[in-house]
Amino acid sequence: MSQSNVLLSLKDVHTHIGAYHILHGVNMEVPRGEVTLLLGRNGAGKTTTLRTIMGLWQASHGEIHFNGHNITPMRTPDIASLNVAYVPENMGIFADLTVEENMLLAARMSSRANQMDEDRLAWICAMFPAVEKFWHHPAGKLSGGQKQMLAVARAMVEPRDLLIVDEPSKGLAPSIVQNMMDAFRKMKASGVSILLVEQNIHFAQQLGDSVAVMDNGRVIHAGSMVALTENPELQKSLLGLAL
Amino acid sequence: MVSFKTNFDFKPLLLLPLLALIALPLIDSFDTWLTLSVAGLAMGMIIFIMASGLTLVFGLMDVLNFGHGVFIALGAFVATTVLSSMLDWTQSSELWRNLVAVGVAMALAMLAAAIIGLAFERLIVRPVYGQHLKQILITMGGMIIGEELIKVIWGPLQIALPLPEAMRGSLLWGDASLEKYRLMAVVVGLFVFAFQAWTLSRTKVGLLIRAGVQDREMVEALGYKIRRLFVGVFVVGSALAGLGGVMWGLYQQNVVPQMGAQVNVLIFIVIIMGGLGSTGGALIGALMVGLMANYTGFLLPKLALFSNIALMAAILLWRPQGVYPVANR
């Protein structure tokens, strides 16, 4: 893959958390304009990889490049300012704030709600109707699915180059998972690159363009989702099941 | 379907009239009860001013600052210097001249506390982020050093801080005696609370503070440098402690270098009762502590301090994370 087509790359990234060596040399690439899935069993290092990309944990070795910047030593706010949006596994919703206030916080260019881009808000609310419906309600009172919608909507309140989401379908009803998939497709169509950690293999299969599979803190397979889907033997050896 | 009846929890607000109503039959005289209640509210407002910054500092960065009292003492001592050099103004019987003198003392006390607060954050707090035990030890050490420096500058002895002429005395309402200064303290406290409430609910900075108290990592992931915000809150919190120190000194009419350490106990009771990180909770906690201290000071003077600890224990049995617990903590 040519360098200009790669938005994010990790080269031999190691991460230590306290005395624990979690990532053991992660190598992976996120192509520009695609949906990349990061798969693997629990404890494989997927969430640690995302947190290391975001600077929430510092890589102890290796390099992470985003859009021509070496972001390895950068702090989280500086990485986010490069138009990287992150939705953590717990969604990171501010429960005591209203939906409107949650959205306003993510709109760095706006100091008041009426300064947010109306067209963009309309686009987001069309994808996630719950955001508009509960606009003035406290976010902590939303259901799990509504919170996940708010988390992704908030991440996209301003144009971003890369959207990173940790387990977007976790614990959601099938109809909301479908809603989430449709939204990710629309975001991709708008030119956003997306990196998802996912356990729901069917969600991954329908959405992913490329895939990286992790185990024991390393990427053990990287390639196109189509190639993985069409190769049951590979699926079994990597994931322990066929798609 | 989710139901949204109301977002505001009114139950803790009822604690204040409940406490006052319980005290009324015990005190026997309505006028005495009214006098004690106003004194308690004034004391509570001053404690709130001193405590509000500390609760945000803890909420935002999980920093246990046991040195907060030094800013209180510093503010009070700056006031002794300012007011003693403005005797023409403080001894005038014209209220506006008194207000100017106290206003200047407050402004300079806040400025001094803010500057020292900035240095305190840089030198003492910043190296121990995330390390609670070290925070307790080093901030207490910082307070001891601060107290000793106050002794070097102002001397080790108690200094009188008399009320300006027109602020002395009481207003009589029936047989109840309402001290003018205490009424003023209530007004200043309400103003500070209103300003904080407006900032926290109506501005982007306030939104960031409220969000940071809940989940600072997520605020950073949204692209905001929370340490800068924390330094700002620390400095403002220190300035408010300085303001509270001026008011507390005038309330007691004297100051000693150890006054910060003495008030620290009350402040920690207040912020724990209120819910760490909650300014609304700190207000309720401070007013309850003020009322309780005055009622028990009248009824059972030997149990005055114990009564506040008992009050805190009772509140924590009801709500283990304080009257207004902060979500996500």
Image (cartoon, coloured by chain):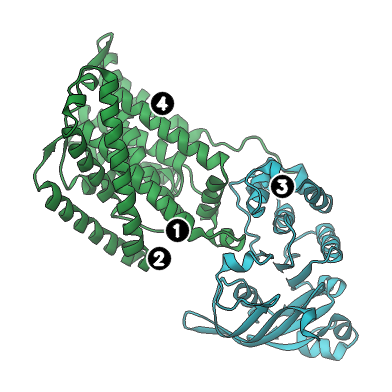
Mark 1: secondary structure: helix
Which sits in the foreground, B75 or A22? B75
Is the C-beta separation of discs 3 and 1 under 8 Å?
Answer: no
Figure colour of chain A: cyan
Looking at marks 1 and 2 on the same chain, the residue that comes earlier in the sequence is marked by 1
Marks 1/4: CA distance? 33 Å
Residue A210 rendering spot, x and y as whole percentages: 82, 79
The residue labelled by disc 4 is B17
Q: Mark 3 is on which residue type?
A: Met
Q: Mark 4 is on which residue type?
A: Pro
Q: Residue placed at 30% from the left, 51% from the top?
A: B68
Is the C-beta separation of discs 1 and 2 under 8 Å?
Answer: yes
Figure colour of chain B: green
The residue labelled by disc 2 is B129
Mark 4: secondary structure: helix
Q: In which image quadrant can residue B138 be found?
A: bottom left
With B103 as the anchor, is A125 left or right in this view? right
Marks 2/4: CA distance? 40 Å
Marks 4/3: CA distance? 43 Å
Q: In which image quadrant can residue B318 be found?
A: top left
Which sits in the foreground, A174 or B153? B153
Residue B287 rendering spot, x and y as whole percentages: 36, 33
| Vertical position of residue B250 compared to residue B222: above or below | above
